[in-house]
Amino acid sequence: MSLVEINFDGIVGPSHNYAGLSLGNLASASHAGDPSYPRAAALQGLAKMRHNMALGLTQGFLLPLPRPNRRFLESIGADGSEDRRLMAAAWSASSMWTANAATVSPAPDCADGRCHLTAANLVTMPHRSQEWPDTVRQLRLAFADAAHFAVHDAVPACFGDEGAANHMRMGTGHDASGLEIFVYGKTGGAFPARQHVEASRVVARLHGLDPARCLFAEQNAEAIAAGAFHNDVVAVANERVLFTHEQAFADPEGTYAAVRAALPEAEIVVVPAAAVSLAEAIKSYLFNAQLLTLPSGEMGLVIPLEAWEHPSVRGWLDGMLAANGPIRRVLPVDVRQSMANGGGPACLRLRVVADPATVDPRFLLDSDKATRIEAIIAAHWPETISPADLGNEDLARRVMVARSALLDALDLAELA
Ligand code: SUG
């Protein structure tokens, strides 16, 4: 059996819109009320998946969830008198950011030798809190092979959990046992701390991780206050490399020392605030990148175009490439529609280390399937949605028909 990293990108749903629902997410707030372009957004997502497949990497995807979510509307007694933000929540396409779908521990880290996934409850934001029951259904289909996977329900709602966006795994290779780093926030700042340490500890126990191979690191409160609502906005790791902003952690030196103690091969690439300020890092989403081991063995960093076009970020990246660091390639991609809601390349994917042969093939992508998905998107996804359109019954029907067409084309109608 060969274990590889498979990135499962969320297909952007047909109701993608800018309702400004995420307090503490500066992009979501600054684009509130803008028209969105669901068709372009979903095609950008497919283009990113094609880009990564062309690098020789295995690519999977997860499907948009049912929207508008009638079950959510019923549960809040919606009758038209409710706050518009609650109605908008029922339309949110936020499940596209699959880094928040679950926390994943690869098989070599888990006591029972299976890959464990725990759906994230996402309780801090009402529009995201409705995702997990539908997400877990999908995960249980994609990873139904009980000899290789265990899929857990979300942890109790008293503990906020945002999934893989606050979790990093380091090791000498994907198929060797690794160090799992759980990053949590402490409440009390201007913006919510979405990841609670209690939730991270529950996940570590459910997955059967070795406590000696787990690190619980506090996120810097200043980073949360500056708009890093998830740790993956200021740090990303892959195998032996941790790529981080100087101000990502509450105790940076203590965190680096703990990483080095657990993994002597670790290489920590720190971007100093003097080169790229916290505000610039968050605005450009430099760290919301996919740090990937390419088939050549080199590491590549898939970044959003916004980071590539940012003068001080570009200056730092050019310097990094000219030096002999562990990240040898920088690969910009256009995911602007997602970025305007605070979702970069890393937010759009859930990493699962597995043998592709053990995954339900309906969730794996190849070029022909990508062409079929693009055709469905082109035919059915609305070109544009203004937040004022949310609640419109004709649009609701269009969004539901679009999703059904995609499920039918992928032989996944059981997710209807
Ligand atoms: O949870 N945006 C998402 C972005 C998630 C990004 N994910 C990671 N960093 N891994 C969020 O804040 C915006 C929705 C709106 O405003 O309409 C939103 O939900």
Image (cartoon, helix red, strand yellow):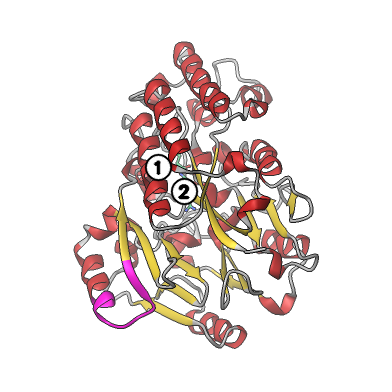
Please identify the quarter of the rendering in which residue 33 is found. top left
Instruction: Describe the element under mark 1 as helix, strand or loop.
Output: helix
Q: Identity of the amino acid at label 1? A: Gly
Residue sitting at x 34%, y 62%: 286
Relative to the observer, which residue lies in front, 316 or 109? 109
Residues at circles 1 and 2 in contact by the CB criterion of under 8 Å: yes
The answer to which of marks 1 and 2 sits earlier in the sequence is: 1
Quadrant containing the C terminus is: top right
Calculate the distance from the C-alpha at mark 1 to the C-alpha at mark 2. 8 Å
| Residue 323 located within the stretch drawn in magenta | yes
Looking at the image, residue 339 sits to the left or right of residue 22; the answer is: left
Instruction: Describe the element under mark 2 as helix, strand or loop.
Output: loop
Does residue 275 sit above or below 195 in this rendering? below
Name the residue at the top extreme. 394
Read off the residue under disc 1. Answer: 45
Looking at the image, residue 55 sits to the left or right of residue 168; the answer is: left
Does residue 342 sit above or below 81 in this rendering? below
| x, y percent for residue 371 | 41, 34
What are the residue bounds of the magenta stretch? Answer: 319-329
Read off the residue under disc 2. Answer: 348
Residue sitting at x 45%, y 70%: 248
Is any part of residue 16 visible from this angle? no
